[in-house]
Amino acid sequence: MALIALLAPCLQANARDKITIVVTSIEKQIYLPAKLAERLGYLKETGLDIELLGEQPGVNPETQMLSGAAQGVIGFYDHTIDLQARGKLVQSVVQLSQAPGEVILVAKAAAKDINSAADFRGKTLGVTKLGASTDFLVQYLAAKAGVKKSEFTIVPVGAGSTFITAIEKGKIDAGMTTEPTISRLTSSGAASILIDLRTARSSEAVLGGVYPGACLYMPTAWVNSHKEQVQKIVNAFVKTLRYIQAHSAREIAEKMPEDYYASNKQMYIDALEVSKLTFTADGAMPENGPPTVLDVLKKFDKAVQRKSINLANTFTSEFVNAVK
């Protein structure tokens, strides 16, 4: 009994150890379930000390996670495949979206010259950052249209205001971004949509299958050694996804921080009407999603091309299936 009494404080301390989850561009609507889970109190209900950390400038979220500075990343599922090809085992534990939620926008000044991905040749395209999922998808769309990587330029322009400035100042001819940036640019007439990947149906038409996007991925070793904590986190996110399905865009928007509206709440709500279609209903991985993502990455990712990828190791359904 004395030994148990001595160990009790240590066990409690371990239970309260902070779990840091890095969210790439936390204000984007494609990552809305992360902040919504926090605002609804679902993360607190787990009893865990969970911190949502916005991506820090110049700091790679995967590097933070793999170094142990963070326990997970809310980003795109495709990174689990890319990381496996580079010898790092991570897995999606809950799938937040069934589509990328991204679009290719074309600047007003370049609209007459870009009518399809085949017209990327000789143009400058913006992505969130090099190595991001926007980079992956732009490279794939170009390759599918017969445009070599050496025939166009990809530049990192961030998201939100920095992407908008790049379009308006003519620094890029087109680029891939998400809501609410999409609506801010299309409503002003500064850009128009060329390729739409905001829903499962439109993504299938462009990419040849369902392309699972946002998810929570974690190092496989950490998942296997912290199953109780992972289950509680997954429970919270599945509960959040169910909330999204059961509530209107306006009701959901009311739960979000005001600065996420980018000074136009109604525009944010209207954009969310479409973005809602991006999210999964229950956190499950779409059945044919992983093979589609692998096929896309094989088109241009040399690391993936050189390796035999075991898709079964890139995600797990164990925790989603155990949610009541």
Image (spheres, helix red, strand yellow):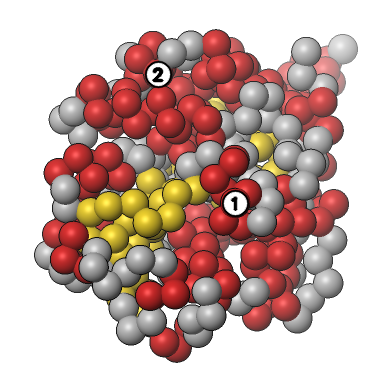
Residue 212: x percent and y percent? 63, 45
Identified at 78% across, 29% down, the residue is 319
Q: Is residue 173 visible?
A: yes
Q: Is residue 66 visible?
A: no
| Image quadrant where residue 53 sits | top left
Callout 2: SS: helix
Label 1 close to label 2 by CB (< 8 Å): no
Q: Which residue is disc 2 drawn over?
A: 249
Crowding at label 1, few (<14), some or many (≥20) Cα neighbours within 10 Å?
A: few
Give whichever of discs 1 and 2 has the lower sequence position. Answer: 1
In the depicted structure, whether residue 23 falls above or below residue 230: below
What amino acid does circle 1 point to?
Ala
Residue 305: x percent and y percent? 72, 78
Residue 74: x percent and y percent? 54, 43
- Residue extending farthest to the bottom is 150
What amino acid does circle 2 point to?
Ala
In the depicted structure, whether residue 276 falls above or below residue 167: above
Q: Is residue 324 left or right of residue 24?
A: right
Where, quadrant-wise, is the C terminus in this rendering? top right
Front residue of this view, candidates 247 and 17: 247
In the depicted structure, whether residue 205 falls above or below residue 318: below
Front residue of this view, candidates 41 and 156: 156
Residue 205's label in the rendered image is 1
Where, quadrant-wise, is the N terminus in this rendering? top right
| Image quadrant where residue 256 sits | top left
Number of disc labels: 2
